[in-house]
């Protein structure tokens, strides 16, 4: 290019773009790199050069054409607020405040997308149609690159490499390239002075395996197939490629490499990362049929974050106790509206004074670091430290459990007493943590019954270095399932799911939608080692046969127990089963005091380092195990009796008469039951209405069945009880 004559420069570049195939009316996505053209950095000439580049681009596509350039800021990646109007792009040729891309962003009429990481700027008649009202994804469905593809757009470069076009990121995500995975970034977006919190999905490369080699092959294939679309200019070149041609070549090139996509081998990427980032210290050996005390003692201290080596080690250990299927959902997997997060590994962390005196460390207790904390290694002021140092609101000697799975921040935790003693002006914070592509794991134990209809037990295994929340639910559920495996002729199939809280249930349900219609009820188990009465939280509906049956058992088996409506006792994975589109009536069983007690929420040691094995009574765990088994027994034996008689039964004819004078209460109960049997109520519901023990109601109904006056049908059961 001639730089001494403006018209000559524009003409040379315009000719090159036309030779490469750019035409009037085209929709063109441009990338520009001055250096690759051999133009030395000269700030005094930069403004004029920007004008020349833009003039050539505009003449090439004409007034009917639309120009698009990247204006990537990576604001959410860098934990910064993204201002659509003022945040500069950082991918300009020379600097964030200058370069062609920033020049283009500031042109009158330019329209910028709201992507806080990978925004683009468009100018022309299709600008708003292409870049406004985009979904919250950088490279997913209906993103700018998919719209560009559907509009018949072109990818153009001035001094840029074909392999560097972000359009290839879109192709890689669209076809499921294993070297990329979806990641949620959160932060704040500001537009015309209004700030709002937002989440944005941007797929990122997996560090264990780079896709750069595939991109080089793609560029080579394009160069061989379309040499006329690439024209040399100065020390570099320009190109103009149809998006559909690039999509076709890229799809073929990536797909022809064995294992280049995730289809059919969903955990391959996570396995590659495990080789690089696995924590070798997480290993647990359990004895055969380990008692609950041993299970808790060996598992509770593990750093069981939602996707982590500590969680995986705990699940592997539990899988040695009972036949188990472990389902894996790799990082970035879409689970309805959720996305599986990355694996988090904390190698080491501590807080120390500037003289090197260490105040606490991750090795002492994993709760000292906020779960999913970002890494940091620098001196911080006392004020900044306190903004990131968390304490327990009620227990001055305890370390709190704090997590930020979907926020990007660093954080430490300690006791309030220790924090109050920190008087120095500055401290050194070291958190050596990393995120990587991992695999969320759900353990499933199945005890088959005569019916495919299933009752689901559930407990979460996450929450590092704590016991009642919710390792106790896991060990109680495990012992219940071990007992069920010894039983024969169960009517229902029973499933026990061990998973990370919330995201684990969503992952399992979203990938097993065919099982949801067969789930007739369930029970979430947690906080079962405490010296509190049992608390039964009802399902969302609250009035199902499962609700009535389990409520009756609690009433008879734990006089101090209590019940509460949905989302008034605890809040855990029962929410996902009761949620819209699922509506499985899952209740929850815990040991907590009613609201208003001093220990609320839940119990005094909740979410803290004080939740140790000392807070989990073996006697209470065994009682809870027996309670769950009683509920299952009642559920198994809770048919719906249907009357085969009309009118009131002539009891004397069948020897059923209970003397009203000798036993008035028994006589009344008998006739109450007779009048309630009409095919609409289960035995448990009849017992509840009559305010009599379940066994008493069951005995009367069984006698009526023996006499041929009643038969069973199952709103819950497929088979008539023997």
Image: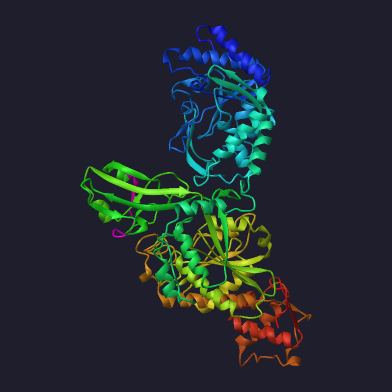
Q: x, y (%) of residue 404?
A: 44, 49
Q: Which residue is drawn at 60% across and 40% down?
A: 172
Q: Residue 547 or 496: which is nearer the viewer?
A: 496
Query: Which SS does the magenta portion mostly show?
Result: loop
Q: Residue 256 or 377: which is nearer the viewer?
A: 256
Left or right of 706 in this view: 392: left
Examine the rendered structure and indicate whether residue 174 appears above or below residue 94. below
**Magenta-drawn segment:** 387-398
Q: Residue 416 or 61: which is nearer the viewer?
A: 61
Can residue 134 be seen by looking at this rendering? no
Q: x, y (%) of residue 315?
A: 50, 64
Q: Residue 704 or 15: which is nearer the viewer?
A: 15
Q: x, y (%) of residue 77?
A: 46, 38
Does residue 225 show up magenta in the picture?
no
Residue 543 position by quadrant: bottom right
Left or right of 418 in this view: 116: right
């Amino acid at each position: 290019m001639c730089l001494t004559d403006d018209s000559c420069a524009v003409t040379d570049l315009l000719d090159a773009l036309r030779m490469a195939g750019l035409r009037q009316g085209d929709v063109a996505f441009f990338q520009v790199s001055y250096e690759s053209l051999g133009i030395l950095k000269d700030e005094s000439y930069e403004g004029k050069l920007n004008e020349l580049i833009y003039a050539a681009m505009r003449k090439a596509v004409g007034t009917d054409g639309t120009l698009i350039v990247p204006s990537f800021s990576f604001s959410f990646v860098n934990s910064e607020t993204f201002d659509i109007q003022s945040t500069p792009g950082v991918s300009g040729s020379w600097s964030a405040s200058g370069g062609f891309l920033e020049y283009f962003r500031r042109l009158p009429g330019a329209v910028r997308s709201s992507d806080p990481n990978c925004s683009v700027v468009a100018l022309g008649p299709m600008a708003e149609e292409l870049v406004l009202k985009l979904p919250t994804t950088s490279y997913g469905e209906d993103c700018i690159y998919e719209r560009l593809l559907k509009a018949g757009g072109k990818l153009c470069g001035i001094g840029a490499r074909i392999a560097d076009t972000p359009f290839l990121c879109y192709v890689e995500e669209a076809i499921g390239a294993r070297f990329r995975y979806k990641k949620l970034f959160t932060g704040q977006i500001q537009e015309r002075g209004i700030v709002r919190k937002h989440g944005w999905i941007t797929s990122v490369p997996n560090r264990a395996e780079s896709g750069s080699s595939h991109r080089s092959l793609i560029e080579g294939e394009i160069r061989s197939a379309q040499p006329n679309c690439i024209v040399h200019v100065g020390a570099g070149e320009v190109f103009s490629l149809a998006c559909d041609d690039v999509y076709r070549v890229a799809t073929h090139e990536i797909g022809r490499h064995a294992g280049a996509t995730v289809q059919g081998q969903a955990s391959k990427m996570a396995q590659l990362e495990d080789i690089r980032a696995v924590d070798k210290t997480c290993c647990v050996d359990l004895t055969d049929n380990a008692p609950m005390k041993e299970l808790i003692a060996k598992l509770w201290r593990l750093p069981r974050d939602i996707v982590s080596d500590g969680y995986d080690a705990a699940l592997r250990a539990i899988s040695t106790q009972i036949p188990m299927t472990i389902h894996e959902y790799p990082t970035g997997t879409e689970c309805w509206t959720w996305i599986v997060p990355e694996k988090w590994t904390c190698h080491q962390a501590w807080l120390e004074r500037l003289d090197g005196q260490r105040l606490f460390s991750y090795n002492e207790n994993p709760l000292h670091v906020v779960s999913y904390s970002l890494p940091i290694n620098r001196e911080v002021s006392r004020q900044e430290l306190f903004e990131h140092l968390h304490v327990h609101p009620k227990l001055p000697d305890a370390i709190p459990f704090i997590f930020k799975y979907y926020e990007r921040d660093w954080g430490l935790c300690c006791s309030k007493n220790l924090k109050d003693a920190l008087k120095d002006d500055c401290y050194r914070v070291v958190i050596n943590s990393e995120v990587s592509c991992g695999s969320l794991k759900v353990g499933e134990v199945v005890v088959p019954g005569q019916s495919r209809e299933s009752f689901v037990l559930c407990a979460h295994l996450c929450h590092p270095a704590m016991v009642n929340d919710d390792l106790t639910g896991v060990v109680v559920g495990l012992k219940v399932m071990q007992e069920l495996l010894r039983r024969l002729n169960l009517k229902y199939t029973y499933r026990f799911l061990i998973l990370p809280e919330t995201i684990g249930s969503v992952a399992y349900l979203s990938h097993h939608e065919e099982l949801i219609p067969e789930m007739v009820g369930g029970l979430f188990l947690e906080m079962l080692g405490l010296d509190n009465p049992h608390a039964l939280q009802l399902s969302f509906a609250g009035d199902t046969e499962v609700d009535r049956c389990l409520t009756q058992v609690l009433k008879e088996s734990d006089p101090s127990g209590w019940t509460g409506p949905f989302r008034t006792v605890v809040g855990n994975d029962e929410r996902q089963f009761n949620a819209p589109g699922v509506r499985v009536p899952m209740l929850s069983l815990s040991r907590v005091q009613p609201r208003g007690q001093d220990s609320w929420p839940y119990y005094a040691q909740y979410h803290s380092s004080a939740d140790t094995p000392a807070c989990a009574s073996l006697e209470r765990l065994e009682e809870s195990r027996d309670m769950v088994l009683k509920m299952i027994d009642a559920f198994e034996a809770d048919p719906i009796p249907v009357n085969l008689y009309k009118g009131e039964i002539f009891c004397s004819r069948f020897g059923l008469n209970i003397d009203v004078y000798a036993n008035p209460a028994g006589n009344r109960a008998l006739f109450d039951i007779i009048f309630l049997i009409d095919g609409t109520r289960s035995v448990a519901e009849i017992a509840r209405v009559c305010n009599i023990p379940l066994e008493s109601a069951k005995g009367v109904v069984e006698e009526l069945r023996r006499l041929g006056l009643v038969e069973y049908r199952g709103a819950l059961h497929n088979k008539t009880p023997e």
